[in-house]
Amino acid sequence: MGMAQGRNSAGRSAQTTNQITGQKKWWAFATVLLTMFFSSMDQTVVSTAMPTIIGDLKGFSMYAWVFTAYMMASSITVPIYGKLSDVFGRKPFYLFGLIMFGIGSAVSGQAHSMTELVWARAFQGIGAGAMMSMPRATVGDIFSPKERAKWMGVMMAVFGISSIVGPALGGWITDSISWRWVFYINLPFAVLAIIGVIFTLPKVRAEHRVKVDWFGSIILVVGLIPILLGFTWAGTKYAWGSPVELTLFVGGVIVLGLFILWERKASDPVLTPSLFKNRIFSTSLILGVLVGMTMFGSLMFLPVFVQGVIGLNAQDSGWVMTPMMVGFIVGSMVSGQIMSKTGRYRYLPWISGAVIVAGSLLLNQMNVHTTWSTVMVNMVVLGLGIGSLMPLMNMVVQNAFPYKMMGTVNSTQQFVSSLGGVIASPIFGSILNKEFSKKLNMTLPASLKQFEGKFVGINPQSLLTKQAQQSISAEFNKYGAAGHQMYLQLMDAVKASLTYGVQHLFEVGLVFAILCFIGTFFLPEVKLKGKEYFKEETPQTDTAENVSEKKRENLYRIQ
């Protein structure tokens, strides 16, 4: 079957690699797609239900922590899962992640306070860390890099469909049943995925005794928590240069410095320092962060533009991501087919980067006169570029290292991408808040200046929610007909100010898009491997031990 096999003490067969062959690989692939679908859908479903949850549990002050707790727990655990799965197999960690995610979902649905919900989401996030890394690694266990390219479109289609279905499903469940079912709905999917993992993923035995770097893992967690908290609170709860923020950042950096020193001496480090000596690996990480920042700056706040300028209501603006997802799917399918047939990718990053810049430029041309059809076209263009580049980054990294290191390199890449999102959120949030406040001060009629203080420190996006507008309207209705007119003037000023802030985010997104395009020219090319990928043992790092491979890599770059 192309893999070493042995027997454990119980007499049951076990493999020494994670490779999946035969008919089982298609069931394993179906399990991966199912996991990707419901884990991706979970985020959009929960986001849609959050206004109702806040109203029921009375905890607006803890709104951000529902997402922050989940994000922190999942981001921190990703590299640990990846490293351990290379040694002990994907199966135990895949199962652990699904079980933890399921338990966290059930407890979240039972929450009777925002504090309980936050802790349940953190618990759910521990499982999500495995679900972020194990499916991608399992795809690598099934297909070689060259084979995997043609399945990129299928994987992106699942991601796209889940993102499209999520908002509508979340709204329907919340309105028709109960917000608690946006969490319970995960349970049947998790059970099906657990069954699939049990029957399709192999049991793996380590070929030699392994010393797990638990101390390094602990240092990594201790160093990341204050930094993640710092980025989460920056610009909202505390000013960027406040003593609290400086303490969190400096303390976290010091601990991570100790982590790096420890990893350089560890016999089997959780994050292998030599990975970063590989140009494909380091370049792809930088490109991943840049394209993530481009997407975040241009698209995460686009519903605000659509609702405030185009005039779509809050429910309809939930579908605003649909055109981008269509571009994602088409872009990934086209680039995947090209790589699968040619085994090469030299020009694809350049073309993808150029399309991303074009899409960002189109978004920057939008103004108060822009129509919804124009927004859709602009999003499709940007989606084409991002959809063709993001999966490519994952594939070329896995192709650059031996199969037995795939979990480690895959999870490290996923980990860095997650950190990019964590960093982007407060940066773009601060820009939006600053520009919103500045424009509101200029736009607000003199008669309404007395109400300006009510919006200081409030997330401006929340002002467009139905609940927020009803609350503000109720306050103004106390003044009769004149109060209603004042309310309309106020909301016009709020929407104009939000539009102004979002347009500045488009400009920042364009800067990152241009940097991403420039960065694609520094990505080396190594021909995609076929079946030999599962037999390779020697890393393709830029070290003295791999001079011959480095020469081969340079040859591809020249060509």
Image (cartoon, rainbow, N blue to C red):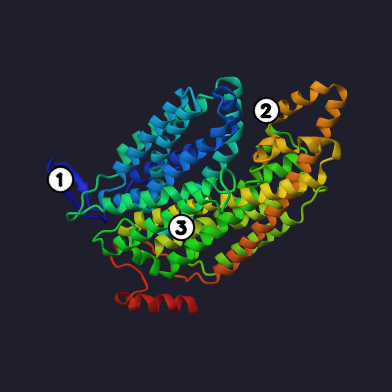
- Which one is earlier in the sequence, the residue at label 2 or at label 1? 1
Q: Tell me which residue sits at (49%, 60%) in the image.
A: 393
Residue 140 position within the rendered picture, expressed as x and y whole percent measured from the top left:
38, 53
What residue would you read off at disc 3?
394
Most extreme residue toward the front, as rendered? 243
Q: Quadrant of residue 24?
A: top left
Give yes or no for contact between labels 3 and 1 (Cβ–Cβ under 8 Å).
Answer: no
What residue would you read off at disc 1?
8
Name the amino acid type tagged 1: Asn
Q: Kindly tell me whether residue 351 is visible in this rendering.
A: no
Residue 542 position within the rendered picture, expressed as x and y whole percent measured from the top left:
37, 73
Relative vertical location of residue 29 with respect to residue 187 in this rendering, above or below: below
Please name whichever residue, 185 or 33, is drawn nearer the observer in this view of the structure: 185
* 18 left or right of 41 in image: left
* 58 left or right of 225 in image: right
- Sort mark 3 into few (<14), some (14-19) or many (20+) by Cα contacts within 10 Å: many
Alpha carbons under labels 2 and 3: distance apart: 41 Å
Residue 272 position within the rendered picture, expressed as x and y whole percent measured from the top left:
33, 61
Task: Name the mark on residue 467.
Answer: 2
Name the amino acid type tagged 2: Gln
Q: Kindly tell me whether residue 503 is visible in this rendering.
A: yes
